[in-house]
Amino acid sequence: MKKKISLLLLSLLLNMPAFAGDGYWVNDLRTLFAQNKAVIMCVNIRTFNANDKNKNDIIEPGLGETSGNFVNAIQRLDAMKKLGVNTLHLLPVTPVGKVKAMGTAGSLYAISSFNEINPQLDDPTNKLSAKQEAANFIKECHKRGIRVIIDLPSCGSYDMYLANPNLFETDSARQPLVPSDWTDVRMFKTLNPDGTLNEDVYNLYKQFVDMVLELDADGIRADVATSKPYEFWEKLIKYTRDRSPQFLFLAEASESWNEPVAKNAPFTPYDRLLQAGFDGFYGSFFNFKDWKTSAELENQLKLITSIQQQYNHEKSVIGSFSTHDEISPVVLGGPQLSKLIIWLQATLPVNSYFVDGFQSGDTYLYKYANQKASKTYTDDDYYYVHKGKIDIFNFSRKPGGKDSVIQDEFIMGNSIKSMSSEIIEKGALTFLNTNNPDVFAYMTTFDKSSIIVILNKNLQRSSSAEIKCNVNKNTLITPVRTPAAPAVGNGKMTVNIPPGEIIVMLADLSNKK
């Protein structure tokens, strides 16, 4: 009973707002992130609380419908808090381009200004500016103990290129450099021919930092951080940290990425980004759906452990199993894959990361997808979308599915993560031997308490396995999530797990005889 009360108190403390004695918000995001306690929800303010009255997935103002903005977004913050979310990652909130656009509203990543807020996110029914509304939104987040990360796009819109082509990199034919197939953006010229930083481009990014600090945001997620050189990030991060030491820098980077986004473009690998001052990166958890054995997951965790040891546990990762660049897990593997992702993030030493709609099973399959539009706000008259991914190109519906079971598991997983944070942060993680490659098992132990996780990676059929584990019949085991209770013997567990299911247990090793 005493232990349960302690866990409850710990959970309450972890969810208390980080306010100083005088009532001002105190940013603690770097510390929270380093301790793997962040539960991050990625949201698109343009759709976050959109009102789609006729349920055709697209927002039509002429029919009295309203897209998401910084004012109506506040209405969903209490719901985010109840889900266990303590950090929001806002997809870009800067103005977007309208020339060579993708989608009828324009891609959020086709930035046209670094020091303004996207007017699409303004509530026209009041006299406040979009920037004032954004500041109020962040203040309301902080009142609820929710931190805010704002996305920093990596490229400029075509509109921005036309206005100032000297800011942009060119290829051998003196044409603006286009990253991959992103036809709506062009790459910035971050280095001069002599290898020095292009101060004009650097100052744009500095303006962005000034703006988000003015808004009182808690961190930045740098889009395609690999596309900027080490010196660029080192200087910008130092500038920011001199003003806000706890300001988080999260790099969109992975150890599995080793090529630039365009030929002859800069490329800075994830480890150099960490050396430049970034607090974390993505890892390669997005490959989990393709992993065949637990060795691939184990190797990913070993890499993270080695990085944490190198930096004295000041760096960490997000559980990038499903980002806004990934297809909905419900589309890829049904609800079972979503549940696996929830519990993996709840029990591994990572910061949990989800995309709005994940918590209720959204497929992100829009009725209007890639059809000709009746009205557009750009030069693109098609509802361009990436199938199965959250829409970042149009004024579309609020994200959300109808799977209440996923939502219940989401809340429970986040609660267990909070209550077990000390074990996850300080414990020793060990992958357990099984005699079935479809069955993954690991155990994290700290101060004679353990979290034991067993999962069936096979989403189509049940899997039986014998798992070597330091438990016996006298070990006190508390089930957390047990769709198939294992049989416990001396030094092993035997289990038959349904397709895509996961078992989570707490073990008190002090009672083991």
Image (tube, rainbow, N blue to C red):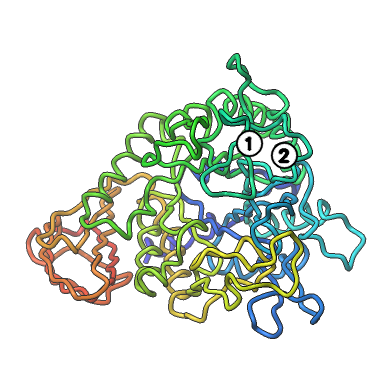
The count of marks equals: 2
State the residue at coordinates (52%, 27%).
Answer: 276
Residue that sits furthest to the right in the current view: 127
Residue 119 appears left or right of 34: right
Marks 2 and 1 close (CB-CB < 8 Å): yes
Image quarter of residue 90: bottom right
- x and y percentages locating residue 46 in the rendered image: 69, 63
State the residue at coordinates (51%, 73%).
Answer: 362
State the residue at coordinates (23%, 76%).
Answer: 498
Q: Is mark 1 on a helix, strand or loop?
A: loop
In the displayed structure, would residue 216 be above or below residue 453? above
Q: Quadrant of the C terminus?
A: bottom left
Q: Which of marks 2 and 1 is nearer the N terminus?
A: 2
Which residue in the structure is indicated by mark 2?
Answer: 161
Whole-angstrom CA distance, mark 2 to mark 1, is: 8 Å
Closest to the observer: 174 or 345?
174
Residue 482 appears left or right of 282: left
In the displayed structure, would residue 308 be above or below residue 470? above
Q: Which amino acid does label 2 sit on?
A: Tyr
- x and y percentages locating residue 58 in the rendered image: 67, 75
- x and y percentages locating residue 130 in the rendered image: 82, 55
In the displayed structure, would residue 394 be above or below residue 233? below
- Could you classify mark 2 by the number of other residues whose Cα lies within 10 Å: few (under 14), some (14-19), or many (20 or more)? many
Q: What element carries label 2?
A: helix
Which residue in the structure is indicated by mark 1?
Answer: 176
Q: What residue type is labelled 1?
A: Pro
